[in-house]
Every structure is written in C-alpha cells, then in structure tokens.
Amino acid sequence: MQIKANLLEERFTSKETAQKMKKFSCISEMADHIFEEYKEKIALVDNGIEYTYSDIEKKVGAIRNALNENGIKEGDKVGIFYPNSADFVIAAMAVTSYGAVVVALPYHLDEKTLYGCTLKFQISALIYDSMSEEKVELAYKLNSNLKKILSDKIADGFAPSNKVSPDAPCAIVFTAGTTGQSKGALLSHKAILAGTMNGCMGFRDYDVFGQRYFLVLPLTHIFGYVRNMMTALYTGSSMYICRDTKNMFREIPTYNPTIMIMVPALAEMALGLTKMLGTKILGNSLKHIVAGAAVVAPRLAKEYNKLGVTLLAGYGLTESANLVTGNPDTLENPTSVGFLYPNQEIKVVDGELWLKGDNVFTEYYNDPEETAKSFEDGYFKTGDLVKFDDNGYMYIVGRIKDIIVLSSGENVAPEELESKFREIDCVRDCLIYKGTNESGNEALIFEMTPRMDVIKELGIEDVGAYCTQKVTEVNNTLLNYQKVSKIIIRTEDFERTPSMKIKRPKNIL
C-alpha cells in the first residue's frame, strides 16, 4: 500500500490561517519575519516577565554575537542546557538563526551524561546560565575544546541572522527511536519548518495565529519544541511558560490560554480536576487542546466537548519533526489519529508505516548503523503498525518493538488491546504485558488505574469488584489468545517517561 498525501490544505485549516501561512527556507528567514511582523506583541511570559518579539530579537542577536566571538561556525553543534524557560526559547532561536545546530539537552541529565553528550554529538559550545555551572563543570574540565557561553553574562552586542540551505542541519533532538535506545535525531531546517507549519493544521474554523499558549511540555521533547514553541512563534502567538507542573493548575486561570498542547495524562488530570474544582481551573478562554505523544483515550474528546473545548488528537515522531497526521473530527472518529498531512508520501509494509517527506529527519547523529537500519528505499521505517479505513483515517495498531510473542506463536499488539479497555468508563489508563498468572503459567497481565471521579459519581463502594466486572465484560469480547488472565488495579500512577508515556516492562517481548 502506498499513499501520497497531496490533499488540499483546506481539509485541515481555516481560510484565515491558510492566508497567513508563509513558507520559509530556513529558521533565519522565519526569525527575521516574526521579529518584524509581531515586534510589539507579547511573545513570552516567564517568571512574571513579559517579553515582546522585539525584546527577544535583541537577546537572540546578542547570543548570535557571542557565538561569532567564540568562533562558532555554520553547522557547528551548540548545546543548550536550560529548564523550560524564556532562556531556552531565546537560545534555540539564536543558534538556529545563526546557522549552527542546536542540541536540545534535557535538563535532567547528570553531569557525566552531559559530558558524554558533548562528545557523542561533537558539541563545540554550551549555552547555559549561572544556575547550571555546577552541572556543566565536569564537561569543561574533561573537554578542553568546549566553549562556554553563559547567557546571563553576555555583553551587549548584536549579530544578524545567517541564511542557510533548507537542507542544512538545524537541530538534534533526543528520541528513543524504533529500538528503545536513546539517540539524537538530526533534523534539517526544512524538516523543522515543515513540522512547524503542520502545527497550524487541524483547525478548520479557527484562526491559529495570535493565540495564547500555555507551555508545560519539555522543550527538549519534539512535541514541546516544534508544536508548542516553534508553531507558537511562527503564528505570532504568545507563550506562558510553566516552570513547574505542580503549579500549572494555579497558573492557567491567571494567564487564560486559548490553546494548550498536552500529553493525554495531563489532559486526564485536568479533566478530573474540573469535576472537583470546576472549569475555572482551565481559565475562561480555552478553546482547543492538542493531545499527543501517547495514546489519547477516545472519551476525552467527548468530555472536553461538554466543557466547550475541542480536543484534537494526532500522530507524530521525533524523526518526523512531530506531526504526521491530525484528526479534526475527534468526536466522529475518536479512535483515529486522523488524516495524513500534505507533502508526505507513505508506504504500509506488513502493517508498518514507512514515511517520506520534507519533515523526515536526516540521520541519527553519529550513529550510522541505526540510521541504515531505519531507512529503506528512501523511506523512514517508523516502527509503528497502522491501518486505514475507506475514508483515509489512520489508526495506530501498535509498535513493532512492543509486540508480545506468546508461546503458542500468536502475536499480540498490546496498544490495540489497551485502546479497547480505555473505552471503559472507570479506566483512566492501562497497560498489558506478558507475565505469569497465579498458577505460574504464561499470561497476559492487565494493569489499570481507575477513574475515581467516575467511581464516586456512580456511588460505587467496591472499586475492585466494579472495575474487574467491567474489564471482564470487554475481555469476553476478545479472541482467546488476546484475553487477559490477571487484572491488577493500581492505587498509584504508572511509572512514566519525561514525555509522560507509560514505561513498558522490559520483558514484554
């Protein structure tokens, strides 16, 4: 099966949005445009400080000047090491508009791993502030070629942007890829810009320009970097940066965002809190939630719709500069990740999605073996198992690496089964993996966290009995080899990755 997604943008975007979208060849072109077009508008709100686009331009120019003074050349790798902050946004825009390659270093890295990253990704300079000096000390001690750029001690100065080729390297973003091992996906300028523009799609009757974003996702994750940060800047929108997720539901009503980019776990949490505290915790202006980076439970769209909020689901990867598909019809087709966005070409080979397009990454940096494994005939092999319906809606069946092989020879895609159980009213989240039952025999194990708000509304006293009954009802509709044999009801949330995905047991294969 081979599909070329050359559908009209009108299928995904409003006329107002389509008229304002501009195509840029590189980040410097985009930066020059937004700094001029939106110069007096608020771009960022961080730690109580408002930054206009003009304010950001001055700071970006000062960092570009510091890069130049430190002898950084076009194509050199520059690490940025900040928590979510205005500093991260400014440094990322400075490095990429200078023509160097930003390496988005997760702030949770310890000093030894940080040092290792400077070697693996051949980083020429690190940009950080004085708060992080202790963490980066080892890297400077052991890597004498590493240049030090403290953003809070940069002298006045301004260097202009540098125009580079669309194919020039732009950013290295960490990913687990298709093998589960952390790698750095190298994305070109055209890839980052394609992903940025894809972020404008999915809103048929809504102008995405000039919105107010609430940023809570890690900026070192592709969903936060491209869909939250880059698309917000591209559309002349403003971003409120939440530095601590513990404070997000206190800060949302103060800022009153119109759009939020969330992982499903946060969307679930927000929904539960609205039932306890009222919709005021979402502010009074929220219109859209874009959910992704993990499976979106079908009922979320329906429940948010009752609150006057449209929840949109999609599918993307680090290697595709984020979004590949988007679903503007989550109420009608809640289990789909939507349609393919334009300017992509795909193959489905033995159920696996292969992808080609401007948004696809160049390589896993400094890892030719993994890169070679990931491409065939010019297509990136995503590792995701998909299916399409007759109307072109795409559905995720599972991940190849997560397939459970039973001793009977049957293959089970746990994600596909989990999606069926997530439709149960009392299931907040769930996980299926291979283990042993009480008799010591091979079995599919089902773990779930219950939706206590639903349990309370129904007046259920025996949570375990009710959840077990509901799970059993769905279980009885499955094929024999798909049935779960052990049900575990958790009192605590699952262990999660920094992007809030559930960590799967290592013995799943």
Image (cartoon, grey):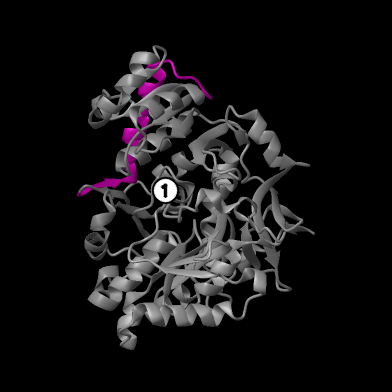
- The residue labelled by disc 1 is 37
Which residue occupies 40% across, 74% down?
A: 309
Q: Where the N terminus falls, by quadrant?
A: bottom right
**Residue under the image location 65 percent in, 35 percent down:** 371
Residue 178 visible within the image: yes
Q: Is residue 358 left or right of residue 306?
A: right
The location of residue 402, given as percent across then percent down, is: 59, 54
Q: Residues within 10 Å of mark 1 (few under 14, many from 20)?
A: few
Give me the residue at 53% from left, 43% from top.
Answer: 176
Q: Amino acid at mark 1?
A: Glu
- Kindly tell me whether residue 207 is visible in this rendering: no
Horizontal side, residue 54 vs residue 105: left or right: left
Quick one: which residue is furthest to the left in this view? Answer: 48
Is residue 2 positioned above or below 132 on the image? Answer: below
Residue 430, image x, y percentages: 47, 66
Name which quarter of the figure residue 78 lies in.
Answer: top left
* Of residues 223 and 436, the one drawn nearer to the viewer in this rendering: 436
User: What residue appears at the point 42 percent right and 78 percent down from the top-left corner?
Assistant: 467
